[in-house]
């Protein structure tokens, strides 16, 4: 799927902003924050709205227009080096490796079922293409994290992560 120019421009701006934050304080491996998806939600918020907490048959699901409203994002991890596990939805490639993807909390998010709220989606970019095994590969991503409202054909996204490392989930 071709990526529109506005997406690439936003991606460059986001990566530049995250790189500027990195210059202000070099990250050390001991300072990596392990995040869970629940950590991305404002306090007293469920990870999934009640309408999506059951099994959603693929042939009866809504499109991206069915994405529930976000309850907001957390800014306390902005500029921090984090590690977060999830599943890949590829957006952009370089050769055979993915260089931009949406990290989602569960298999099927954004494709076969309505996507989760934007505060449960992370746009990941990486300079080093990641050779993935296909759609919905489980990975662990480490890099600089921040809020970044982005809209794609699949869903609205509330966070961005400039990946230093993308590894298969083990």
Image (tube, helix red, strand yellow):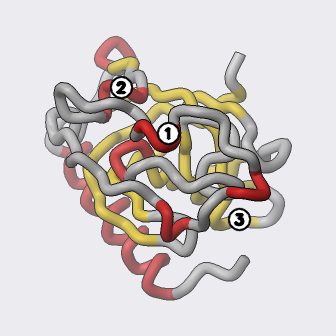
- Which mark is on residue 116? none
- Which mark is on residue 38? 2
Residue 115, percent across and down?
Answer: 53, 53
Is residue 19 something one can see in this rendering? no
Q: Residues within 10 Å of mark 1 (few under 14, many from 20)?
A: some
User: Quadrant where the C terminus lies?
Assistant: top right
- Quadrant assignment, res 95: bottom right
User: Quadrant where the N terminus lies?
Assistant: bottom right
Residue 122, percent across and down?
Answer: 44, 48
Give the Cα separation between the discs numbered 1 and 2: 22 Å
2 or 3: tag closer to the N-terminus: 2
Q: How many marks?
A: 3
Image height of 124 relative to 54, above or below = below
Give the Cα separation between the discs numbered 3 and 1: 17 Å
Residue at image x 71%, y 55%?
112
- Quadrant assignment, res 154: bottom right
The residue that disc 3 covers is 93
SS class, disc 1: strand
Return the residue nearer the eye: 131 or 28. 131
In the image, farthest residue toward the bottom: 5
1 or 2: tag closer to the N-terminus: 2
Return the residue nearer the eye: 147 or 118. 118
Residue at image x 49%, y 39%?
164
The residue that disc 1 covers is 164
């Amino acid at each position: 799927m071709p990526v529109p120019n506005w997406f690439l421009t936003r991606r460059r701006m986001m990566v530049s902003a995250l790189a500027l934050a990195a210059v202000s304080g070099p990250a050390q491996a001991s300072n990596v924050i392990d995040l869970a998806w629940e950590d991305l939600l404002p306090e007293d918020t469920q990870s999934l709205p009640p309408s999506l907490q059951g099994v959603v048959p693929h042939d009866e699901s809504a499109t991206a227009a069915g994405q529930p409203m976000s309850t907001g994002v957390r800014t306390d991890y902005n500029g921090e080096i984090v590690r977060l596990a999830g599943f890949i939805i590829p957006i952009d490639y370089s050769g055979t490796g993915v260089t931009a993807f949406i990290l989602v909390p569960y298999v099927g998010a954004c494709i076969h079922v309505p996507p989760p709220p934007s505060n449960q989606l992370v746009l990941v970019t990486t300079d080093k293409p990641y050779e993935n095994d296909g759609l919905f590969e489980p990975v662990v991503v480490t890099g600089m994290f921040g809020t970044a409202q982005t809209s794609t054909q699949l869903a609205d996204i509330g966070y961005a992560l400039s990946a230093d490392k993308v590894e298969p989930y083990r």
